[in-house]
Amino acid sequence: MTSEAVRRVQSGNPWEDSFGFARAVAAGDRVLVAGTTAFRGPVLYGEGDPYEQAKVAFTTAVEAIGEFGLGVESVIRTRMYLAHPRDVDEVGRAHKELFDSVRPAATLLVVDGFVDPRVLVSVELEAFRGAVDS
């Protein structure tokens, strides 16, 4: 794969610079979105609310694929990382609201925690830049 075939976008999250990563990377027919939380700049949206955090995180991730001209209909895989098992239903509800019409492959895991303890959920997604069959 040539360097022209890979494109990266940043979202302005301060961890992108300090850790050296891109919000999203397009390589060939795939666009991968890095772990995304409900932080927008220094502000954490939905503190204490897993549903709201999931909505904000997924919206930010979908905005990242928007940089490549893609939308929700192009999402083929999602991953959800939760700090607490009690939040499964609320995060699942946010996922369904956004992705019910496209039904991507999805994984949900409960993890030991995040860098900032106020974060309840982190999401990743993968999108396809080719024709999508239903």
Image (cartoon, grey):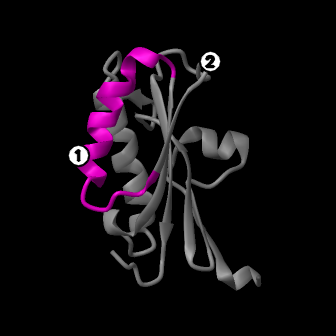
Quarter of image, res 29:
bottom right
In three-dimensional space, the C-alpha distance between marks 1 and 2, rounded to whole angstroms, equals 26 Å
**Helix, strand or loop status at disc 1:** helix
Quadrant of the drawing holding the N terminus: bottom right
Residue position marked by numbered label 2 in the rendering = 112
Disc 2 marks which amino acid?
A: Asp
* Residue closest to the eye, 78 or 27: 78
Q: Residue at x 59, y 19 (%)?
A: 113
Q: Which mark is residue 97?
A: 1
Q: Nearer the N terminus, badge 1 or badge 2?
A: 1
* Residue closest to the eye, 52 or 110: 110
**Helix, strand or loop status at disc 2:** loop
Give the farthest residue toward the front.
Answer: 134
Q: Is residue 52 above or below residue 58?
A: above
Residue 56 in picture, x, y percent from top left: 33, 39
Q: Which mark is residue 11?
A: none
Q: Residue at x 34, y 15 (%)?
A: 48
Residue 36 lies in magenta, yes or no? Answer: no
Q: Tell me where the magenta segment starts and ends, as one range.
A: 83-105
